[in-house]
Image: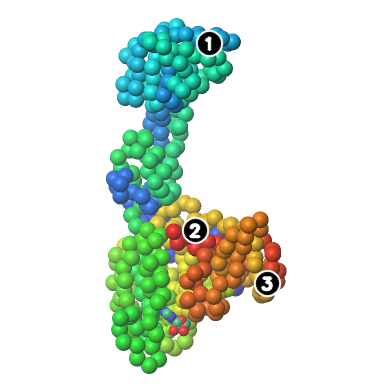
Amino acid sequence: MAQLSDDCFAFGGALTPLDVALDALAERTVPIAGQSVVALKDAVGRYLAEDVTVPFDVPPHANSAVDGYAIYFDDLSPDAATRLPVTGRAAAGHPLSRPASRGEAIRIFTGAPMPAGPDTVMMQEDCRVDGDTVEIQPGIKRGANRREAGEDLRRGEIALRAGHVLRPQEIGVAASLGHASLRVFDPLRVAVFSCGDELRNPGDDLDPGAIFDSNRFILSAALSRLGCAVTDLGILRDDRAAIEDVLRAAAADHDLLLTSGGMSVGEEDHIKAAVESLGSLNFWRLAIKPGRPVALGQIGGPNGPVPFAGLPGNPVAAMVTFLVVVRPLILRLGGASDLAPIIYRVRAGFDHRKKASRREFVRARVSTDGAAGLVAEKHGRSGAGVLSSLVGADGLVVLPEDMTELKNGTMVDFLPFSEVMP
Ligand code: AMP
Ligand code: MG
């Protein structure tokens, strides 16, 4: 199993553009998840751990694309109907056991191997059958309705690359190559907790001054959607010794520790001191809104250092920083090679002012406006703590660093939640 270097999360103090930070993360991190060989039926959603090479041509034999008659093109008259005797039969799984000769028509069905000899298949709808003969009109092209061996995949080429997520179609390709199982990365084992004396678990009483913990549930759900194996460590009280014990124990059997809140330097926030005493912690100050610094560090474990990520406590900031920073980190640690989501271009349906030099993520709802295409409207109340604004939002309008004023009607980037939290 690969390991991260001790200083991989060390990072400068200045406000950093998101792209610079993401490039640095990609450069400094490697897949650390374990690997297993799993049956195809268990492989969906997992990341492939090795290239899959094509061992033989797919399809292995030339075959018919339709139900009809296999013939030699050169037997057909170019300007009159041709009559040929039907002298054999080939069905899927039941090839003709002999080569076919000039002057023969072989009854053939979709997927049946082409008999040796004929180069063309006449569709049955275009033929007239008369007893043991078939009448074929002119006009077909040589080689019509014939699928060549290797048309899908050629022997020796790479069909699936390590790091790709296995969707139904990738699993289908593996099956078509005869693989009953695949080597994949294990789900990344992530321990999630929250920190703050004001936090209560849903279901408990809410005493004066307390609020329910929502971040832990957002993050756990998002991690599950990303294919991680999630351990819920609950709410850690603002008690440094207790926090250290829990983190030390969690580092023994997890690939990543993730928390939100409690990362500021206020005297009630003890996570920072706890992580520093167990390893190292760096504050990545990203030029994004919403988003306070994201803390990235490592905690010493029996099998080497384990990455630690601390997100802002405000729920919207926690979610945005999770999606733009922690998600790519998790994918990378978990073996994925393709980290960038697809960004769509949509028309902004609102005016907006922003500060220069930072990237802003605006919660938005998208609708289809006939000829104008997709239009994004600002959604919900603003504020980094307004969690309800994410409900009903379809994603985030992404406003670039150099923009200060957005005018209604301008084309903007849109990151759908469905891209990053399937
Ligand atoms: P902090 O980052 O700890 O200073 O918290 C910033 C804000 O986010 C405060 O209003 C906290 O009460 C709130 N907050 C922190 N953690 C959570 C959580 N797990 N769920 C909901 N709100 C939180
Ligand atoms: Mg706090």
Q: Is mark 2 within 8 Å of ligand 1?
A: no
Q: Residue 326: x percent and y percent?
A: 46, 65
Q: Amino acid at mark 3?
A: Asp
Within-10-Å neighbours for mark 3: few <14, some 14–19, many 20+: few
Q: Is residue 36 visible?
A: yes
- Marks 1/2 in contact by CB < 8 Å: the verdict is no
Q: Is residue 400 visible?
A: no
- Marks 2/3 in contact by CB < 8 Å: the verdict is no
Identify whether 17 is placed above or below 236.
Answer: above
Q: Is mark 1 within 8 Å of ligand 1?
A: no
Measured in 3D between alpha carbons, the distance from the residue under mark 1 to the one under mark 3, in whole angstroms, is 69 Å
Q: Which residue is mark 2?
A: 419
Name the mark on residue 140: none
Q: Quadrant of ligand 1?
A: bottom left
Q: Which residue is mark 3?
A: 351
Q: Quadrant of the C terminus?
A: bottom left
Q: Residue 291: x percent and y percent?
A: 53, 74
- Give the camera-side residue of 48 and 389: 389
Q: Amino acid at mark 2?
A: Glu
Q: Amino acid at mark 1?
A: Ala
Q: Quadrant of the N terminus?
A: bottom left
The mark that comes first in sequence, 2 or 3, is 3
Q: Which residue is mark 1?
A: 81
- Give the camera-side residue of 411 and 36: 411
Q: Residue 112: x percent and y percent?
A: 37, 23
Q: Nearer the viewer, mark 1 or mark 2?
A: 1
Residue drawn at (39%, 64%), measured in percent from left and top? Answer: 223
Q: Is residue 172 left or right of residue 396?
A: left
Badge 1 element: loop
